[in-house]
Amino acid sequence: MQKEREIIKKTETLYQVGKENSIVLKDSEISLLEQLMIHRIMHSKSIHLFLSQLAGKKLNSNAISNRLRRLVEAKILERVTLNISVTRAHVPRYYYKLGLRAYRCLVSLKRIENTKENFNIFKVSRKSEVPRLHTDAMSILANQIYLHSISKSYVNFTHMRGVEGVIVTSEGQELGIRGLNYAIPDWIFLQEKHFIFVELDTGSQEQKMIREKIDNYESLNKIFLEKNGYTMSLVFAVLDNSIDVVQKNKKQNRSKRVASLKQNLSSICFSIFAVSAKRASYLILKILTNLKIDKYELTCHWLNMAETVISSKKNLLVEQIHDPEELPQELLEVQNDVLDLPLLKLTLNQRSQYLLPIFVLEGNVESYKSIKFVYQAISDINTKVKTSEIILVLVYVNSMESIEDILGIDISFKVYKTDLITWQQTNNLPRMLKVTGPFTQE
């Protein structure tokens, strides 16, 4: 491969690289080199987090910095520095990329193949300077997602930069997507036969451009993925302060942007999600692990909650509506679009309330559209009918999803959020969050 071939000796989990200026690498450092091959260049903070996660404990920051300096001296890594000071003082922000010895090491250990494509990727990465804000932020987010998955002991997936212009299937088949009418994702995760394409949203793209992007994803899904037995999900992660990037006028709360995306995005071909970046790691891991909710179990918990409500209040009658004909005429229009769960009728002092439950996935655009449709219908009904009241109950998997999900809907009647975990863990009334505004709850 080259004149100065690296000599690598493995002793337990240590690798001695080279004879002259030799250095011993740990397994975690070899794994870091693999990630650098994917990212091309990584922020030092991402590397600190990566090494601490693999060590299973928080490592001393100075010790990691000294180790990275040694890897640079040994030509395993190369360092790029950005001065982020707004004064004359020098405030460095460090980035690291692979050195030539690192590439040779990965080839020798058979962590990568010494193909023309891989060597070209390495050559391009060596030319990488300080990344643009979007590239920097996406690398940080991808590392967060990867480390969150490791922390949950889930590693049964692959990931890659979408901007390489190539999609690699689980069978190793490659599809070049650059120059075609396909979208080019910012990052790609693949679990068996399911792709998760990630778009990092900085708030600069107009909705028209995003809609065109959805059209391109639909072309990719129809022309390539479906024909080869693959499915996909699309996740828009809105840049927030959980991503440590150098940005002027950084906005702390991106709820309005998330709500705007959910309102304007749609597809009948695949699931679309819009969340803040801080929730992306949780969401993507949930999709990767293919978490499914048993509808029978869900119904049982809902009815158990009803029994708890009955026992907590005197003279309260709770009925489960089985037959659509039992519904008031005004509810028939929305009944088919709503009922993942049985509708409940509560009667107290001759006044009726209908609890209309919808099972909701955090960030899911389809869930949002259902809520919006039903909400408008209920608003109209509550205005016309004075003898009864309809209450919308949004049911989530867990309390964190119910708290973090962004609705962005002006509230004119009673809307509550609740969750399955709360139902399972308490013998008292389950926790219900009252939605008080587009972005507020109590």
Image (cartoon, rainbow, N blue to C red):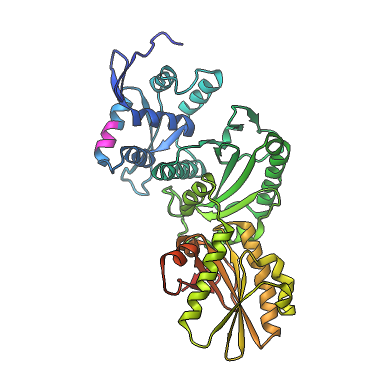
Q: Is residue 318 above or below residue 386?
A: above
Horizontal and vertical percent for residue 95? 39, 36
Q: Which residues fall within the magenta stretch?
A: 63-67
Q: Which quadrant of the figure has residue 148? A: top left
Residue in the picture at 35% in, 22% down: 75
Q: Is residue 431 left or right of residue 316?
A: left
Q: Is residue 271 above or below residue 93?
A: below
Q: Which quadrant of the figure has residue 343? A: bottom right
Q: Is residue 366 left or right of residue 50?
A: right
- Furthest-bottom residue in this view: 349
Q: Is residue 50 magenta?
A: no
Q: Is residue 66 magenta?
A: yes
Q: Is residue 30 left or right of residue 362?
A: left
Magenta part mainly helix, strand or loop?
A: helix
Horizontal and vertical percent for residue 113? 50, 20
Q: Is residue 72 left or right of residue 155?
A: left
Horizontal and vertical percent for residue 323? 70, 72
In-front residue for pair 176/8: 8
* Residue 257 in sight in this render: no
* Residue 339 in sight in this render: yes
